[in-house]
Each structure stands twice: as C-alpha cells, then as structure tokens.
Image (cartoon, grey):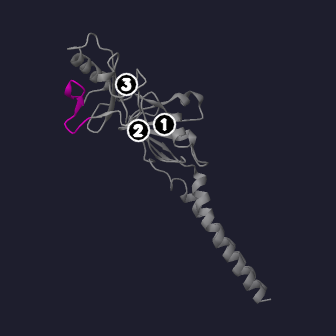
Amino acid sequence: MKVKTDFFLKAALLFVSGMIMLLLFSSCNRYALYQTAAKPGAKQDSNVQAVEKTLSFGDKISLSIWGHDDLSVGSIHTVYNSPEESGKWLMIDEKGEVNLPQVGKVNLDGLTLRKAEEKLIGVYSQFIQKPVLNLRLLNNQVTVLGEVQRPGNYVFHTDHARLVDMLGKANGLTDYARTTEIKIIRGTETIKINLTEAINNETLVYPRDVIYIPPGRNKAFDRFASKLIPLASLLTALALVYSVSND
C-alpha cells in the first residue's frame, strides 16, 4: 500500500509542477495589450512631434476678451472666470459653428486654437480696437488604460499635460505596472516611455492620446497561482486521505 501511496503523491506533485511550468511559458503576454510589433519607422521615443488638435463638433470652448466681460464666456480675466462644470462655455455645433455674443455664428471647424483666435480677433476688430482675446478648449482629454488604479478618460484644460499628472489623476499605478515600457499611442505613432528615467517625468501628452501601462509577467503568475493553490491543496488532501485509509 505504501508504494501505491507514494506513487499517488508523486503523481500529484508532478501534476502541480507541470501546471506551474505551463504557466511560466504562457504568462509572457497573456494579460498585455498593444503587444504587436512596432511598424517599420514607428517612433519609439518622446520626441515625436505632437499633432495640434483642431476644433470640431462637440468641442466646448470658453472665450475671454480683455475689458469686455459682456462679450466673454467663462472669462479668465475677471472674477467671472468659471470652469466647465458651471456651464460657462460654448459648444461647437454639427455645422462647426459657435454662437458668439453680439457677433452671432462663426465657423471654427477644422481650425487650431491659434487659428481660431486669429479669426475671432479679425471678427471682433470690426467694433473693438485691438482686441485681446483668449480662446480655451475645455474638453481636452486622454485615455489611460492598463495598470492604473482608475482607468478611464481624463480631461485637462491646457494644450497639453504631463504624463505623470495624468497617471496621478488615475490614482497612480498598480503594483503590477511595468514602468519601463509605458506606451503613448498618438494617432499612428507609438511612443515608448521608461518612467524610471528622470528625464521622462516631463513627458507631455496631448488631446486624444492613449496612455497604456502594461502589466509585468508576475501578474499572470499571481492570477494563475491563486487558482492553482486550491487545486494543489485539494490534491494534497486527497493524497493524505488515501494514505490514511490504506494504512
């Protein structure tokens, strides 16, 4: 009986060992996204030139005209400055137009903020001498995916934002984050960032960027191990029961 018991125990141990080896070979990229090989010529550094965002349907903007609060919407120059949440903004409609105080509808579709400001300065110059004008886009956002505490879309009110600030908005990284291979997907470009290098702490992200933090290999191991442990415990218990019943 002892020979049969030893054989059963060895078989159980071999089974568990085999499952662990299978895990080690299969966990390399099981839980990782964006793991396809980079296309020839794809950028792999943070020096990729940003594509300047253009205005389009659904964009929310605020307008500030120095000394003319009656013409401003969400002015940044006075105490009437208001964030997007309070409703002090204008939305570009499906025709690419925005309805401005006293001016009426102006088409801004396809224009960058700088070009849109230049166009509005020309419009307001008809009845304001040398207008000082500031246009802000209120719904700039990036998407943060992967190993962060709160994946999702995050809004910022400037032309760009720091990568580390967006990770902070996502409540930081998880314990599994592979900080040496963070990816920023910008249109057809893929930018690889090693966050452990101090110079990359000033890496900038732009509207519509996708930030992806891949998991380390230990995540796959931990997940599989959590399922393997009960199985191993069951096999051990069965082996003990079998051993006791045959003594």
Q: Nearer the viewer, mark 3 or mark 1?
A: 3
The answer to whether 28 is drawn above or below residue 10 in the figure is: above
Say if residue 1 shows up in the picture. Answer: no
Residue at 44% across, 47% down: 34
**Percent from the top left, x then y, of residue 40?**
38, 37
Crowding near pointer 1: few (<14 within 10 Å), some, many (20+)? some
- What is the CA distance from the residue labelled 2 to the residue labelled 1? 34 Å
**Percent from the top left, x then y, of residue 94?**
21, 39
Q: Assign a secondary structure to mark 2.
A: helix
Q: In the displayed structure, does residue 226 sit left or right of residue 33?
A: right
Q: Assign a secondary structure to mark 1.
A: strand
**Quadrant location of residue 57?**
top left
Instruction: Please give the range of residues in magenta.
Output: 92-108
Question: What residue is shown with label 2?
Answer: 85
Q: Amino acid at mark 1?
A: Lys
Which corner quadrant holds the C terminus?
bottom right
Mark number, residue 110: none
N-terminal of the two: label 2 or label 1? 2
**Quadrant location of residue 18?**
bottom right
Question: What residue is shown with label 1?
Answer: 192
The answer to whether 176 is drawn above or below residue 137 in the figure is: below
Residue at 59% across, 31% down: 197
Which corner quadrant holds the N terminus?
bottom right
N-terminal of the two: label 3 or label 1? 3
Let me know if residue 236 is in the magenta part: no
- What is the CA distance from the residue labelled 3 to the residue labelled 1? 38 Å
Mark number, residue 75: 3
Contact flag, marks 3 and 2 (Cβ < 8 Å) = no
